[in-house]
Image (cartoon, helix red, strand yellow):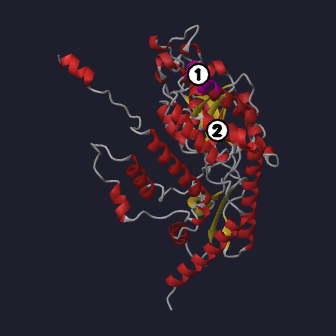
Amino acid sequence: MDSFRESMIADETLDPPDWTDAGALSHRIVDDAIAYLRDVRERPAWREMPAEVREFFNSPMPRSPAPVSAVYDDVARNVMAYPMGNIHPRFWAWYMGSSNFTGALGDFLAAIQGSNLGGGNHAAGLMDSQVVNWLKEMVGFPASASGTLVSGGSMANIIGLTVARNVKAGVDVRERGVGAMPKPLRYYASDQAHSCHRKGMEALGLGNRALRRIPTDAGLRIDIAALRAAIAEDREAGFKPACVIGTAGTVNTGAVDDLQALAVLAAEEGLWFHVDGCIGALIAIAPENRSLVAGIEQADSMALDPHKWLHAPFEAGCALVRDASQHRNTFAVTPEYLESAPRGLASGEWLFDYGLQTSRGFRALKIWMALKEHGVEKFGRLIDQNIAQARYLTGLIEAEPTLELMAPTTINIVSFRHRLAGASEDRLKAFNTEIMLRLQEEGIAALSDTTVHGRHCLRVAIANHRTRRDDLDLLVCETLRLGRGIEAAATPL
């Protein structure tokens, strides 16, 4: 009798109770999304959340259902209205792309299909491999190289550094661990390298001290002579030099190391050559500026970010490795429940053999759709456009006596500050920080700040396909206006 009653109870599902209502709401959401992007220029670059919005995120966990239309209303009112702002044409703060509508549709379709890209015989897996192949071609890697789509640049760099560790360890480090290595490894990068490399060294069990920071020259590129001397010194001290990290676009200023010289040095010294190309690797597709990253194609491994200059919606990074067998041997594990089959679903390639994730989202579709829509050549022109815009802004700064360029503009990052007569470095930092915060709070533009050679400055990273030159004119005008106001308010009558 009990089993009969149980059979009469309807099974539950998460599908909508009424697909017509679901369709109507979906059309409303799409219409709102189109308007959101169409009118982005009319909104502030950023705005602070009021107290009642912050309080919304302290609401209790939901235990019972609510109409999905009401759920969407909450999202529209409290989330969509207060974004980070990186799709805005005057967002130039932390280095990130500005997304694109077709890519967002790709993300939606990927979520609808719901495929797990750990591997297997299905279309999403083939598309993942195809996008990796396209990225290899963009940067000049051979077709025989391997790659994997990951969350972003930090993870892509860690993938490359891990392969380097295992290849250079001198022992089966996967089986025996880093404690069994006959000599401690040394990695080398410039003092401008991204902080993810420190995290990588720590996660790999090598420790922060295993990453030796090499001084930079006047252009903030790694000093090749100092690098050679450091390698010789470490060998003499009983360490094993293992890997040199070249940076194709530093996060502070956009400086590009001499990648050709690093490739030659790595070959002579028997080092793994990894390139952190998360900022600038894709300059390789830019017709006017590709020479800036000459030599990137000689790397043993590389990290790059489609969610930057390919403007894929977050998140989408990629790690490439020249020797596919070394890449796979670093990560591949075949448990009994994931063995390959001659036919059927398990007959496809296991993509998780090339990274740390077994479960992987369908990141490729949003990249694939945007590339198919616009073509690689257009993305290359947009990169050239951003670099030209950075040079334009540099010219505006150099022509304005009140402003000071703080580092050479190599690609698309401009570092500058507002002068203040007779002010100390601490006073200049406070003054420029206040300008930056007011630019953000008034919704004019989103900048970040940094320190270059011990001096604080404002930082404009133009990786935005919506930016126009009149946006940069506005930035300079508003920076001067705010500077005058702050200086006047601080000056006694």
In this rendering, position of residue 179 left or right of residue 121: left
Asked if residue 438 is positioned above or below residue 103 in the image, the reply reads below
**Which kind of residue does numbered mark 2 sit on?**
Ile
Q: Which residue is mark 2?
A: 367
**Magenta stretch encompasses residue 121:** yes
Residue 322 percent location from the top left of the image:
69, 26
Confirm whether residue 246 shows in the render.
no
Mark 1: few, some, or many residues within 10 Å (few <14, many ≥20)? some
Please give the name of the residue rendered at 59% of the width and 38% of the height, measured from the top-left corner.
317
Q: Looking at the picture, tell me which residue is in the foreground, 473 or 256.
A: 473
Q: How far apart are the alpha carbons under marks 1 and 2?
A: 18 Å
Provide the residue span drawn in magenta.
119-126
**Which kind of residue does numbered mark 1 sit on?**
His
Q: Earlier in the sequence, mark 1 or mark 2?
A: 1
The tag on residue 328 is none
Residue 186 percent location from the top left of the image:
58, 32
Question: Please, what secondary structure does the residue beneath circle 1 have?
Answer: loop
Residue 457 percent location from the top left of the image:
59, 63
**Magenta stretch encompasses residue 397:** no
